[in-house]
Amino acid sequence: MRVGLFVTCLVDLMRPSIGFAALKLLENAGCEVVVPDTQTCCGQPAWNSGDKPGAEALAKKTIAEFEGFDYVVVPSGSCGDHIRTEYLGMFATEPEWRDRATAMAARTFELTDFLVSVLKVEAVPGSYTGSVTYHDSCTGLRSLGIKAQPRMLLAKVKGVELKEMNGCEECCGFGGTFSVKFGDVSAAIAERKCDFIHSSGARAVAGGDLGCLLNIEGKLRRMGDETTRVLHVAEILAGEA
């Protein structure tokens, strides 16, 4: 099985360890993994900001780079959803690109969903000693149905104690440009999320979208919490945490 790994621009720039963890998980499951070195952004920030020409150019670039793979795997629910959902509407009036976008959407998966639903992995290479609570990112949860998958995989990690928090499905306040346009509202939502994390008693919080994790970690640190770890689920599963 030949898999194209879409690393995401945020992972590439801010925490490459997530990309290496995803690579390790896929290879451990028997996949031949290719990371196209020309990949950049899926175009989601441009699309959400109203830059239609810029978003379309990035979408066409991404489609062209990832054609030819059996599957495309993304360690991000929001980027995965943009490719699977928004590309289809974006090219609704361009038959050639609509068909290419449709074909790509059908073989694009968020990482934990791919490991559980397609590869049906029975074991993961990582181990982790400690308690973890899980934040369900909005887009992954509501658009892609990412809920049980990461928890099923965490249950396979030796040493992990999962402590569910109240409000695990509530937004962390990031929302991409939302956190910039509505800073005060975003900060209040993030503080509520951090209170839930503290109340869970877990020593770490995990999630599947780096944007959310950066927002949560930033708020935790500004609240004076220097000890709660903020990890991508792939880092825990791969033993890279």
Image (tube, rainbow, N blue to C red):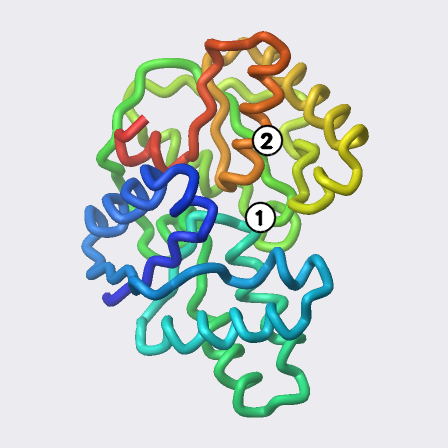
From the viewer's perspective, is 212 left or right of 112?
right
Instruction: Identify the residue shown where x is 51% and y is 57%.
Output: 80
**In terms of sequence position, does the residue under pointer 1 or pointer 2 come before the other?**
1
- Quarter of the image for the N terminus: give it: bottom left
Observer-nearest of 159 and 58: 58
User: Residue 168: x and y, percent?
Assistant: 63, 29
- Residue type pointed to by label 1: Gly
Instruction: Name the disc covering residue 114, or none.
Output: none
10 Å crowding of disc 2: few (<14), some (14-19), many (20+)? some
Q: Splitting the image into 4 quarters, where does residue 235 fall?
A: top left
Identify the residue position indicated by label 1 in the image. Answer: 140
User: Residue 117: x and y, percent?
Assistant: 41, 54
- Please, is residue 18 above or below residue 131 in the view? below
- Please, is residue 167 above or below residue 179 in the view? above
Question: In this view, which residue lies farthest toward the bottom?
Answer: 95
Instruction: Identify the residue shown where x is 28% and y is 60%.
Output: 35
- Please, is residue 232 above or below residue 54 in the view? above
User: Residue 188: x and y, percent?
Assistant: 77, 24
Q: How many marks?
A: 2
Instruction: Identify the residue shown where x is 19% and y is 55%.
Output: 30
- Please, is residue 51 above or below residue 112 in the view? below
From the viewer's perspective, is 172 left or right of 100?
right
- Residue type pointed to by label 2: Asn
Q: Splitting the image into 4 quarters, where does residue 55 fall?
A: bottom right
Instruction: Identify the residue shown where x is 37% and y is 14%.
Output: 130
Identify the residue position indicated by label 2 in the image. Answer: 215
SS for callout 1? helix
Q: CA distance from mark 1 to mark 2?
A: 16 Å
